[in-house]
Structures are given as C-alpha cells and as structure tokens.
Image: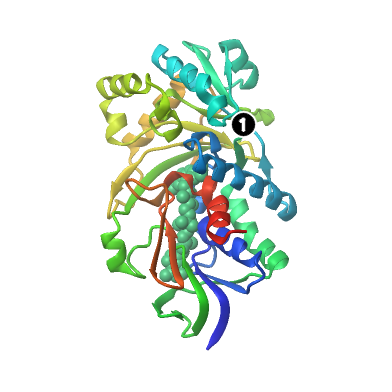
Amino acid sequence: MHQADVAVVGAGIVGMAQAYAAAQRGVSVVVFDRDPQAIGASIRNFGMIWPVGQPSGKRHRMALRSRAIWLKIAAEAGFWIQECGSVHLAHHDDEWNVLQEFHALADSLGYETGLLTPNEVMAKSPAANPDGLRGGLWSPTELCVDPREAVRTLPAYLHKNVAIEFRFGTTVRQIDGMELETSDGQHWRAEQIIVANGSDFETLFPELFAKSSLKKCKLQMLRTRPQPEDWRIGPHLASGLTLRHYANFSVCPSLEIVKHRIADEQPLLDKFGIHVMAAQNRLGEVIIGDSHEYGDVFTPVCSGEIDQLILNELASVITLKDWTIGERWFGVYAKHPEKAYFVHDPYPGVKIVTGLGGAGMTLSFGLADSLWGV
Ligand SMILES: Cc1cc2nc3c(=O)[nH]c(=O)nc-3n(C[C@H](O)[C@H](O)[C@H](O)COP(=O)(O)OP(=O)(O)OC[C@H]3O[C@@H](n4cnc5c(N)ncnc54)[C@H](O)[C@@H]3O)c2cc1C
C-alpha cells in the first residue's frame, strides 16, 4: 500500500492547481493522470486568463488571485505569459451601449476598464476591423499563455518546487473509502482525495455525476499559421457576440437588446453557441473560436458549418495578415447549468472539483486557494 497525504485524480489545470495549493501547506501530494501527459480541456483552450469576464465580487476576486499565481508560476517555471489585456469590440450601436453601460459601473464593481474610440482601438490592435467600428472596452487584467506549453511545463515545476509526485499513464480505476486502485495494479491510501477528472463522468462516482446536473460541452477551435513578419494582434480581442457569453455584462440593461437582435438575425449563432474571440500565442499563431454544444456524447469530427460560421463572424470584426488555418480541434469541458464550479464531497475526505466550464484557466488557482485556505 502506497501512501500520500493528498491524492489528486487528474493533471489538468484544476488538478494541478489543487495539488499546488495542497503542497504549499507542506503535505505530500501525488497526482494521477490516465494519459502520458494531460490532453484534456486544459491544453485545448485559448490560453486566456480572463478576469474581466467574471461577475463582480467573489468570482472576480478569485480570477484576479489566479492571475497573480499564473504570473508568479510562469516566471519561476519559465513558460511564456503575456500581460496583453483585452479589448471588446463593438460593431453595432447596441453593443457599444452595453460597453458604455458596463464601463459606467466598472469602477464601483471593482473592474479597471477604459472606453476606446475607434482610433484608440486601432492604436491598441491593428487587427481590429475599422469598418463599422463604434468603439471598444479596454481591460488590462487579461493574460495569455500557450496552454500546451504551460500544462506540459507545470508538472516538472511542481515536482521540483513543491515536491509533488506525478503518475502519468495511470488511471484511477476505483476509489473505495480513502483508498485508490490504479490501472498499474497499485493501491494508494490518502488522508484527502481530490477528484479533478474534468468531463469524465463515467469512471469514478458515475451515479453521483448522473444526479449532479453537470453537462458536457463540445467547443470547436481553430488556429492560424504564425502571422508573417512577427505581426501581433496586441490584446485578446472579443466581438459583440461575446457580450452574451460572460456573466459580467449581465448588469447592462442593453444586453437583452443585443441578445434579441442576434437571435433574430442569426439564429444559427445561438443554435451552436457561437461567440468569437482571438488570442495570439508566442509563435504568432492566432487561436480563434468558438462554439458550444451541450450533450452526453458528441460526434468525433469538427463541423465545417460551425467552423465557417466562426470564421465569417470573426472576419467581420477583425482582420489578419494570414487567415490560413493550420489546425482545427475540439475540446470538451464540464459545466453546471447554475454554478460556476462543482465542488462536492461524496463523503468526508473526498472532494470532487470540476465543472469550471469556460473559465478553468481563469479560476482554477484562485479556487484552489480558497478551498485550501492558503
Ligand atoms: C475549446 C476550449 C476553450 C477554452 N478556453 C478557455 C480560456 O481561454 N480560458 C479559460 O479560463 N478557460 C477556457 N476553457 C476552459 C478550461 O480549459 C477548462 O475549464 C479546464 O481546462 C478544465 O480543466 P480540468 O482539469 O477540469 O479538465 P481536463 O483538462 O480535461 O483534465 C482532466 C484530467 O483528468 C484526467 N482523468 C480523468 N479521469 C481520470 C481517472 N479516472 N484517472 C486518471 N486520470 C483521469 C484526464 O486524463 C485529464 O487529463 C476552454 C475550454 C475549451 C474546451
């Protein structure tokens, strides 16, 4: 029987953040992942740490705490991170109204924002499409990482700095009391078990997941080839469609007008949950997406119709030097219809942490801090 104070199932960003917070309390931590390296939602995302999208109060503070931890860890682990900020672009009057309403409240709600004229937007980002541009909302708090690099680098950093042991290629087949049985035939005993298994609802505690209301969501993404001559888009860019997606804008009276217009004019965007954003990584590739389809099982392919809708929408709000798509993929995450995350103890000593939806990169470190009381 092997022993650890804390055993974590899953080496995605949620599991690694939990392991990091636990290890900082001086306890021994082992992390299991079924694959030779994490290949779930945590390496398939935009790499956006996006505090401005969180509703004001606890979740926004949690995102800002995550942001601080990302900056510290990236500096120590040596992976690329950029304090790029973000600009929400408005190409319709109703979108511009939402941005102005949000900015008017932002200071009192704890956000740092600035309203930009079209010329000021263009000065921040040469990628903004000036055609029909009403203005933009600047936020300085957003970060960019390359999730493939960050998630690949973190295990070695966490092992070296806080002595976390990683067991990759090892599925946790069963949890019985405070014992775990792994696919290599080993048995582990831990004082505390964290189940950060992402959207795998089938392997561990399947009955509990069936009753949890958690849903799986499939998202399609695309990545351009590196832009020529080191051309940079500047901050993360989000279109007016994105106003429908992030809870921070729910305080804006004009949001309903935006939602109704889009539903009337382009019902397919609602059907496939499309809103469009762009991030640029260190290599100069622009990551663009995305769509949201909820279900229990998904087709294994990316729909060409959805990709085209995403590209059409993006082309109406940004311009790129090179639109050649180098890669297409999809990711699946777990999401709860009402909660920002799903934290549940099936019994004392075991905690399931998942369901962070589209904010796992943004919230995981802050959530782990709050759960472990670091
Ligand atoms: C396309 C896309 C774009 C996104 N963009 C962003 C973004 O820009 N910003 C942001 O904040 N969030 C974003 N998100 C959300 C974010 O990526 C997720 O919330 C986050 O990655 C979820 O992390 P996780 O650790 O729960 O899941 P995962 O990364 O899926 O990790 C779960 C891990 O558990 C392992 N596992 C499961 N069961 C077992 C078992 N029994 N034994 C051993 N191992 C097991 C799996 O192998 C996997 O590695 C995006 C998500 C997607 C899909």
Q: How is the image coloured?
A: rainbow
Name the spot of residue 186 as percent of width and height, x first. 49, 85
Name the spot of residue 210 as percent of width and height, x first. 27, 62
Q: Amino acid at mark 1?
A: Gly
Q: Is residue 322 above or below residue 366?
A: above
Q: Is residue 262 left or right of residue 93?
A: left
Q: Residue at x 46, y 85 (%)?
A: 185
Residue 78 vs residue 343, the one in the foreground: 343
Q: Is residue 302 above or below residue 177?
A: above
Q: Is residue 280 above or below residue 164?
A: above
| SS state under label 1 | loop
Name the spot of residue 327 as percent of width and height, x first. 49, 43
Q: Residue at x 59, y 47 (%)?
A: 66
Residue 213 vs residue 203, the one in the foreground: 213
Q: Is disc 1 surrounded by few (<14), some (14 to 19) or many (20+) residues within 10 Å?
A: many
**Is residue 74 visible to us here?**
yes
**Image mark count:** 1
Q: Residue at x 62, y 14 (%)?
A: 120
Residue 143 vs residue 280, the one in the foreground: 143
Disc 1 target residue:
85
